[in-house]
Image (cartoon, rainbow, N blue to C red):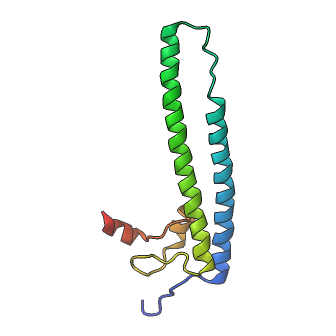
Amino acid sequence: MTNERVRYSDKDLAFFQELIQSKIEKAEKDLSLINENFVNNQNNGTDDTSPTFKAFEEGAETLSKEQNAILANRQEKFIRDLKLALIRIENKTYGVCRVTGKLIPKERLMAVPHATLSIEAKNMQR
């Protein structure tokens, strides 16, 4: 393996750019749905039910708000990571493992388009 490429071709980068942009669009729609769900969950219409049921309902609502917040944070991080991948595409450093300096296989980038580590490097971290 003497003549190993150190970056993806412009054609490959253009392909990954399209892939990432479509994932960002979907992720932003998902985040919007999570946020809408959070706003719509404010009133479940339990005002006229028994106090015990209402206590259970409020507990579930709190849990739901926490779960929504966690989901929203994860989605925001995912979007941020994807946008950083677009910057790496512009810089032509996309798909290069930041530990080994080798190309991350296309199959891995298809599954995790914002990856910055090869499987080899990820396994070294454990």
114 vs 109, nearest the viewer:
114
Indicate the quadrant containing the C terminus: top left, top right, bottom left or bottom right.
bottom left
**In the rendered view, would you say 123 is above or below 26?**
below
Q: Quadrant of residue 98?
A: bottom left
Quadrant in the picture for residue 42: top right
Q: Nearer the viewer, residue 120 or 33?
A: 33
Residue 95, horizontal then vertical, whole percent: 53, 75
Instruction: Note whether 66 is above or below 7 in the view shown.
Output: above
Residue 15 sits above or below residue 6 on the image:
above
Q: x and y percent of residue 39 in the render? A: 65, 34
Q: Position of residue 67 (x, y in %)?
A: 50, 37
Q: Is residue 42 above or below residue 82?
A: above
Q: Residue at x 63, y 47 (%)?
A: 31
In the image, taking residue 116 as reference, residue 13 lies left or right, namely right
Left or right? Give the position of 22 relative to 74. right
Write the residue at 56% across / 45% down: 72
The quadrant of the rendering that contains the N terminus is bottom left
Is residue 100 left or right of 86 when viewed as pictured? left
Number of marks in the rendered image: 0
Q: Name the residue furthest bottom.
A: 2
Place of residue 11 in the rendered image (x, y in percent of width and height, measured from the top left)? 67, 80
Q: Residue at x 64, y 47 (%)?
A: 30
State the residue in front, 97 or 104.
Answer: 97
The one nearer the camera, 73 or 116, is: 73
